[in-house]
Image (cartoon, helix red, strand yellow):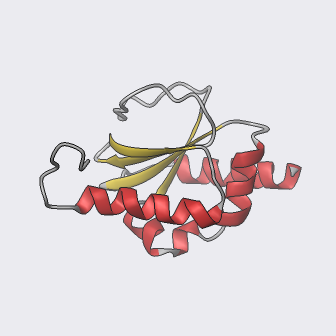
């Protein structure tokens, strides 16, 4: 578990250095000693950047207790880690709170990405 935490910290530092924001990003809000964050890092994090989803919304990391970057506009506070926030030009378009395991994570993320690209105007009850 310590190796996963060290790997995640190194990966986070490398990802944050010289960060150029993509149009869409997946912001992972995490914290030290979060076992669900470690599970995501082990099950998804090692391959995320290779997936279609990872190419559409590259991963960006944010520690829950670090100062919030000024370039981000989210719709509410983050209370749980991990929380995954889909960003479009720095503004939140959706989120996944917690990590329900890889069998649930991928469909939830696909739904967020599809919702973002949907061209049909939302109607009541269809958001």
**51 vs 127: above or below:** below
Coordinates of residue 62 in the picture (x, y in percent): 55, 39
Which is nearer the eye, 77 or 45?
Answer: 77
Which is nearer the eye, 30 or 75?
Answer: 75
Q: Relative to residue 58, is residue 79 drawn left or right?
A: right
What residue is rendered at 61% in x and 66% in y?
103
Q: Relative to residue 122, is residue 82 drawn left or right?
A: right
What residue is rendered at 18% in x and 42% in y?
124
**41 vs 88: above or below:** below
Q: Relative to residue 35, is residue 16 drawn left or right?
A: left
Give the farthest residue toward the right: 2
Coordinates of residue 73 in the picture (x, y in percent): 34, 32
Taking the image as drawn, is residue 83 in sight?
yes
Give the farthest residue toward the front: 125
Total count of labels? 0
Q: Relative to residue 101, is residue 111 drawn left or right?
A: left
**56 vs 60: above or below:** below
Which is nearer the eye, 40 or 3?
Answer: 40
Coordinates of residue 20 in the picture (x, y in percent): 39, 52
What residue is rendered at 31% in x and 63% in y?
114
Taking the image as drawn, is residue 58 in sight?
no
What residue is rendered at 87% in x and 52% in y?
1
Coordinates of residue 93 in the picture (x, y in percent): 32, 45
């Amino acid at each position: 578990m310590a190796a996963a935490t060290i790997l995640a910290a190194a990966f986070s530092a490398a990802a944050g250095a010289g960060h150029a924001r993509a149009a869409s990003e997946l912001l992972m809000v995490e914290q030290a000693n979060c076992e669900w964050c470690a599970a995501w890092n082990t099950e998804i994090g090692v391959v995320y950047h290779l997936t279609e989803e990872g190419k559409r919304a590259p991963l960006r990391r944010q520690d829950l207790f670090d100062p919030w970057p000024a370039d981000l506009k989210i719709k509410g506070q983050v209370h749980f880690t991990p929380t995954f926030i889909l960003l479009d030009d720095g503004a939140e378009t959706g989120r996944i709170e917690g990590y329900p395991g890889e069998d649930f994570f991928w469909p939830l993320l696909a739904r967020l990405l599809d919702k973002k690209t949907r061209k049909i105007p939302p109607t009541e009850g269809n958001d």
